[in-house]
Amino acid sequence: MASFVLVPGAGGEAWYWHSVVVELRARGHEGVAVALPAGDDGAGWAEYADAIVGAVGEGTGSILVAQSLAGFSAPIACERAPVELLVLLNAMIPLPGETGEAWWTNTGQREAQLEYLAAIGVTPEEARDDRVVYFHDVPGDVLAEAERRGEPEQSWTPMEQAWPLDAWPRTPTRVLAGRDDRLFPAAFQSQVARDRLGLEAETIPGGHLVALSDPRGLVDRLLDDARV
């Protein structure tokens, strides 16, 4: 049995992982979705890491999966908890001392996104619609539930804080990039992973919210990483 701790991106909602948790448990594995204090202006990277460490607990061999913004907080938790493997899923990869708000410019995200959107025929005007960028491949019933729940709050506090580690943790790390990610295009993710971690990203089916659009396929891939 493998044990997965699943960390959401901006908004910090554990619900993002609900279908992945169900799929993991159906296959005899453990999945714990973390709720982050994203709406709390008093919470920064340290408090996000506290929530992740609490979910990992004192057991050994957990696989930590970090989506999007969680690329900042999950590595901090790896310094404090018994994590066997860190999986970055469409994730931001910070450098020591870099803030979350500086990351976008430093990596050239906007230029890469606009180039990719133009290549697939999506205009900047169309890209102002979250359905176009984030939910384009999410099933209608899941999209309806997400919209019923409303957009979760995300405080700007952590985005103004420098990433506190001196270097990437020694935890083995893998990078998964959604082939159809319209926020962080796969080629962009691959370049960032190569430049910042010296790792090659693996392209998988799905967009930015692949845990909502293809939970079964994502679990297949995560279990491959877990070698179970």
Image (cartoon, helix red, strand yellow):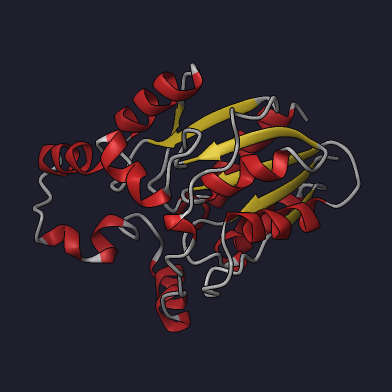
Does the rendering let one see residue 181? no
Left or right side of 133 for 63: right
Identify the residue at image location x=62%, y=27%: 173
Does the rendering let one see residue 65? yes
Q: Quadrant of the C terminus?
A: top right
Vertical placement of residue 223 versus 150, above or below: above
Kindly indicate the quadrant of the structure image that contains residue 223: top right
Left or right side of 45 for 206: left
Identify the residue at image location x=48%, y=51%: 69
Left or right side of 138 for 111: left
Q: Residue furthest bottom?
A: 148
Q: Quadrant of the N terminus?
A: top right
Identify the residue at image location x=28%, y=65%: 130
Observer-nearest residue: 142 or 64?
64
Vertical placement of residue 132 versus 152, above or below: above
Q: Position of residue 137 (x, y in %)?
A: 35, 54
Kindly indicate the quadrant of the structure image that contains residue 181: top left
Q: Position of residue 167 (x, y in %)?
A: 59, 28
Vertical placement of residue 130 versus 90, above or below: below
Q: Residue furthest right?
A: 59
